Image: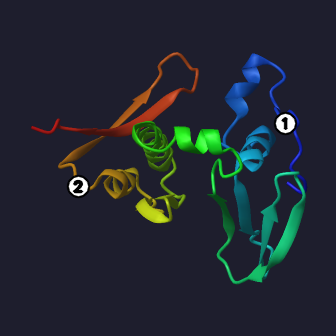
Amino acid sequence: WYQRRVRVTSKLKHFSDISYVHTYGFRGEAISAICSVAKVAMITRHSSDKIAKSYTVKTDGVLTETGSSHYNVGTTFTVTDLFKNLPVRKKFYQGKKGKEQLSEIDHFVRGIAIANPSVRFMLRHNRQLVWQHASSKQLKDSITSVYGSIGDMTDITYSSDNGSGVQITGMLSASAK
């Protein structure tokens, strides 16, 4: 991720390759698209590094190291000033349409947060915290962190009998009244 350039980064050559994908990753095309309409900053630290490095990405794709800091192991992307350089788009997302889009983003990010309990998520809108999800080790804690207390939850597990290795785990809760 040293330069944001428009490129295809797919590691999938055949449909069956999808079964080997175990992370979401941050795709080159996504970085390119986001950088073209917003300000993007990143702070990252690998477990082998003693100190984190912070970067900014300009709309032309140039990556600039902006300094170093004390930061936990991991990576944080910050996207600000979305559509600032596209006034027509910015105006479109203000008002009712903007609220609809924020609701869709909120729903999507909450789903990712539940599916990844060990990752910390934070959603901000107009510099205000909408919600945050602390990392946890248990799915139940992750669900509670995202949606609050929803009553008794029961673990479920399904394993296929046909030798395919398919296993599904999750939680069930009684419906709210």
Image mark for residue 9? 1
> Which is nearer the eye, 29 or 166?
29
Q: Mark 1 against mark 2, which lies toward the viewer?
A: 1
Q: Is residue 142 above or below residue 28?
A: below
Residue 127, given in percent of the width and then of the height, sits at: 50, 65
Residue at 87% in and 38% down: 6
Q: CA distance from mark 1 to mark 2?
A: 40 Å
Helix, strand or loop status at disc 1: loop
x%, y% of residue 26?
Answer: 72, 46
In which image quadrant can residue 47 be found?
Answer: bottom right
Q: What element does badge 2 sit on?
A: loop
- Give the residue furthest to the left: 177
Q: Earlier in the sequence, mark 1 or mark 2?
A: 1
- Quadrant in which the N terminus appears: bottom right
Q: Residues within 10 Å of mark 2 (few under 14, many from 20)?
A: few
> Residue 159: x and y, percent?
45, 27
Badge 1 amino acid: Thr
Residue flagged by tag 2: what amino acid is it? Answer: Ser
Q: How many numbered badges does the structure rendering display? A: 2
Identified at 49% across, 31% down, the residue is 167
In front here: 99 or 62? 99
Image quarter in which the C terminus is found: top left
Residue at image mark 2: 149
* Res 45 quadrant in image: bottom right
Q: Nearer the viewer, residue 140 or 24?
A: 24
Q: Is residue 162 visible?
A: yes
- In the visual, does 85 lie left or right of 168? right
Regarding residue 134, the answer to whether it shows in the image is no
